[in-house]
Image (cartoon, helix red, strand yellow):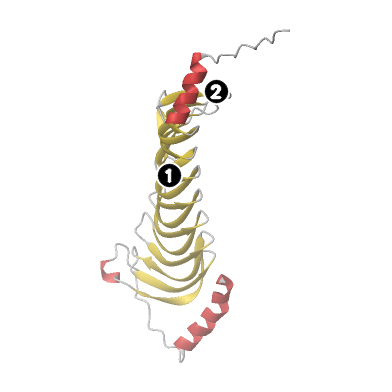
Amino acid sequence: MPHLKEAKTKQPPWKEADYLAKKRGVRHTVYSVNGDEYTGEWQENRREGKGTYKWKTNGAIYDGDWKKGKRGGFGTYSLPDGKGSFKKEYSGGWKNDMRHGYGTRFYSPEDYYEGEWYADKRCGWGRMYYADGTIYEGEWFDDERNGEGMIRYTNENRYEGSWKNDKKNGPGKYFFLTTGQLHEGVWVDDIPKCGTMKDFNRESAPEPTKYPIPENKLADLEGVLTEAEDRFLPEQD
């Protein structure tokens, strides 16, 4: 009895084109089952090189570099603004689909951060601009202000010193430039616990105090300060 060979099922032309595009690195548009869309370069069936990805669920767009199927390199992530256009949310470095390296994140038109990122969190050096005009510049860790940093308020008063868990913690200086005074001491969770207060450029301050700060005549000023600092500094460990 003769053996009949089954005819090979021929793939539709579009499937063959998709396969060749993904294999050879040709710039091509591919639609996912969930409605997402990618237009860009491919290599070995993975997004590689330059490309644009559009999410159907929220209308977001990523335009930039890809590596081994994930966002990697430089790219911009944007969201619909509700007016037929897009608003930029993040522009900068990426690694393994996460913000990584140096980049700028827009929380609102007035609130934005520019600086270093690690594994999708602010980490390293960076500058944060707040909507009320306040600016923080310094170190970050785990998406919070941690390390050494300076914050300048809208009235030009500023704090320079240590931070932990997003608050003033440890040795620092607070410059009351509006009144011409300087407080130097130790902070715990944004509260100054001990230190010294003295006049600082009081003559040129816009709203100087009525009287200068009198001289401190404690017999052992340094000893008192050291004892107080030893009491509060261990809380920073």
- Observer able to see residue 80: no
- Observer able to see residue 228: yes
- CA distance separating discs 1 and 2: 27 Å
* Residue 69 pos. (x, y %): 50, 37
Rendered position, 5 above or below 75: above
Q: Are marks 1 and 2 in contact (CB under 8 Å)?
A: no
Q: Secondary structure at mark 1?
A: strand
* Residue 57 pos. (x, y %): 55, 27
- The image's mark for residue 35 is 2
- The image's mark for residue 160 is none
* Residue 198 pos. (x, y %): 37, 76
Q: Quadrant of the N terminus?
A: top right
Q: Nearer the viewer, residue 199 or 58?
A: 58
User: Horizontal placement of 117 versus 236: left or right?
Assistant: left
Rendered position, 72 above or below 175: above
Return the residue at label 1. Answer: 105
Q: Residues within 10 Å of mark 2 (few under 14, many from 20)?
A: few
Q: Residues within 10 Å of mark 1 (few under 14, many from 20)?
A: many
Rendered position, 161 above or below 61: below
Identify which residue is drawn at 46% across, 25% down.
20
Residue 219 position by quadrant: bottom left
